[in-house]
Amino acid sequence: MKPDYPYHVNLHEHRLVYELLKRKLRTAIVQKVITRLRAKDLRHIFYTLHREKPQPGQIPSLEMMTQTRESFLYMAVFASIYRCAHRGDFKANMDIEAVMFAWDYFCETFPGHIRERRPFGRIRPANFDEAWVIAEAMQTGLVELQYCFRCHHNFLVTYCTRYQPVCQVCALKSKNKRGI
Ligand SMILES: [Zn+2]
């Protein structure tokens, strides 16, 4: 980082880079947040922290995350935690501290669920990249949390999926009742 930046700014950014890379956020995403660091530097820090290279490939998509109905239920849990932890208006900006808090809390709730490589399970977000994508989509409106007056749960809606924008808790219940 450039030495002419104030000490406290450098310190804050270094801490943030550490916190994001510790959770294995893709260096391509980290670079969007901390623009003063080169991709090469980020990859080096990632390697120093994990003794492995960062994952190559595409940034995860909502479509990939919503292949099963059950995934919606877990994503709604994550989205609810993030929405509660956000210190302002989650549609106005992303609260990075809140994303990290929500992800850590989610991991405590579902221990051992993290998947960095295929095959991915039904518990989504399966890694911090996916958690980031969900939080970002909540800001842009691609993901919405709605309240179901039938089962009294929050449910997650996204239009980037083959599933109808309905409460998947109720949809699963009626599917099980019909025995299909
Ligand atoms: Zn419902």
Image: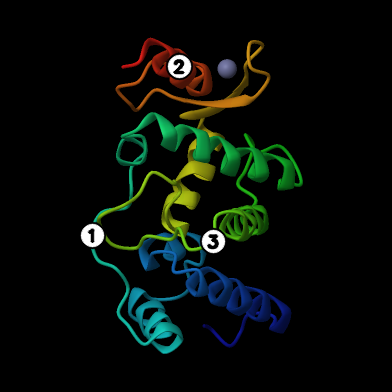
- Seen from the viewer's position, the closer of residues 59 and 109 is 109
Q: Amino acid at mark 3?
A: Pro
State the residue position of label 3: 111
Give the structural element (helix, strand or loop) at label 1. loop
Q: Give the residue drawn at x 47%, y 22%.
A: 168
State the residue position of label 2: 171
State the residue position of label 1: 57
Q: Amino acid at mark 2?
A: Ala
The residue carrying pointer 2 sits among few (fewer than 14), some (14 to 19) or many (20 or more) residues within 10 Å by Cα, namely few
Q: Give the residue drawn at x 56%, y 25%.
A: 155
Tag 2 and tag 3, C-beta contact below 8 Å: no
- Ligand 1 within 8 Å of disc 2? The answer is yes
Query: x%, y% of residue 1?
Result: 52, 83
Question: Would residue 7 be found to the left or right of residue 111 on screen?
Answer: right
Q: Amino acid at mark 1?
A: Gly
Question: Would residue 133 be found to the left or right of residue 116 on screen?
Answer: right
Give the structural element (helix, strand or loop) at label 2. helix
- Decide: is 159 above or below 20: above
Q: Give the residue drawn at x 49%, y 50%.
A: 131
**C-alpha gap between disc 2 and disc 3:** 26 Å
